[in-house]
Image (cartoon, grey):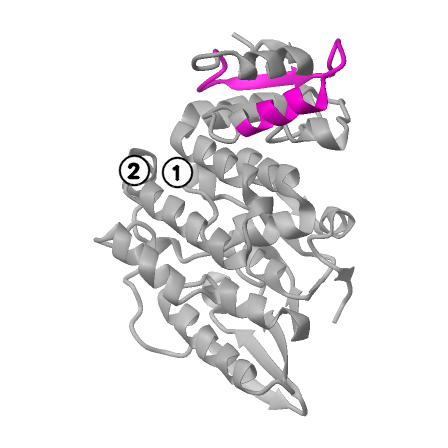
Amino acid sequence: MPPRLWPADELVSALRAPGEPEVAGEVVLVGPPERPIAPDALADAVRRLASLPALVVGWPGWSPSVDLAELLDVVPASDDEVVEVADALARHPRAALAAALHLRGAHRRDVPDGLVAESAIYSTLLAGPEHRRWREATPVRHPIEVGGDRLRAYRHGDELHVVLARPEVRNALDAAMRDQLLEALAVAEADPGVRVVLRGDGPAFCSGGDLDEFGTAPDPPLAHLIRLRRSIGLALHRLADRTTVVVHGACAGSGVELPAFAGRVVARPDATFVLPELSMGLVPGAGGTVSLPARIGRHRTAWLVLTGRTIDAGVARAWGLVDAIDLI
């Protein structure tokens, strides 16, 4: 059965009524209001919505005002995208609702607070049935590598060039690469005169986290604490005003989330961007629920998370996910 269409004023009334709103746990399709909505009523509804486990989807083609957009989690462009969002909730209800609830509060959190909240949600989902099903259906491809260089770093004048160097796996980010990248960034943090240029070897900038490591942590709470202590996103945030990231080819997961922390992101024309985590029963876990909303807003971030669609460099530039398209 397709989701019921709620005029925005009806949804506001439902959210303000006593008891649990009847829209909990559903896809809520919202269209233009049929009657004026008082500002205080809308504010009450938005506060109630903040903790409501439902996906609130704008009617395709509706361009809500800024205040009414606060009611929505995602604003699809077509009926097909509404179906995709509904399918996301049906397939991965825990991860989809966790993403929507978390993104609603993105604008109220600073970067460290946002990273703490994201990591806690991510760690919880790692131990959940949706991710377990994905892990059981996705066998480990290669033994986990121990040791070895994952990147190259060199100075050129006042620039520190850092190059991800696992081209054979499209620069998949594993724990060893994370640690080596943090060491390289620490050099720049120690010298305020150094600028950072980050790029990747081979056919792609970064294909995301190394899937062979997903779900292998025996202790999700400990993994949460390690993720916070070893956060590349936080390091890039601290260096944002003097960091440029050059991306190319397939940029997936952390390959999208981490560059978005930088002050300048340059994409080659062949660059593409996708957030695939929901298909694994997860939310973005490298800081994307913090870095992407700051660049493209929470509605577009939710669209990328919930639909799993890929965008090209032109769309990324139009949205502000990248700052320029160049052949450098």
CA distance for labels 2 and 1: 8 Å
Toward which corner of the image does residue 224 lie, by quadrant? bottom left
Disc 2 + disc 1, Cβ < 8 Å: yes
What's the residue type where badge 2 is placed?
Gly
Type of the residue with mark 1: Gly
Image coordinates of residue 46 in percent, x first then y, are: 59, 27
Q: For the C terminus, give its image quadrant.
A: bottom right
Which residue is the site of mark 2?
Answer: 128
- Residue 96, compared with residue 184, is above or below; it is above
Q: Tell which residue pokes out farthest to the front in this image.
A: 40
Instruction: Give the percent coordinates (x, y) of residue 7.
Output: 68, 12
Give whichever of 52, 45 is nearer the camera.
45
**Which of the two residues, 270 or 185, is positioned nearer the viewer here?**
185
Q: Which residue: 69% across, 19% down?
A: 59
Q: Which residues fall within the magenta stretch?
A: 22-47
Label 1 Cα neighbours within 10 Å, binned few <14 / some 14-19 / many ≥20: many
Of pointers 2 and 1, the one earlier in the residue sequence:
2
Badge 2 density bin: few <14, some 14–19, many ≥20, Cα 10 Å: some
Q: In the rendered view, tell whether residue 164 sits above or below residue 19.
A: below
Residue 216 appears in the rendering: no
Q: Is residue 163 left or right of residue 283?
A: right
Estimate the x, y position of residue 129 in percent, counting from the top left. Answer: 29, 34
Residue 221, percent from left and from top: 27, 52
Label 1 element class: loop
Residue in the image at 76% along x and 22% along y: 62
Instruction: Establish if 124 lies above or below 256.
Output: above
* Residue placed under numbered mark 1 in the picture: 281
Residue 33 lies, with reference to residue 154, above or below; the image says above
Q: Residue at x 38, y 53 (%)?
A: 211
From the viewer's perspective, tell me whether residue 76 is left or right of residue 228: right
Q: Which mark is residue 178?
A: none
Q: Is residue 268 left or right of residue 239?
A: right
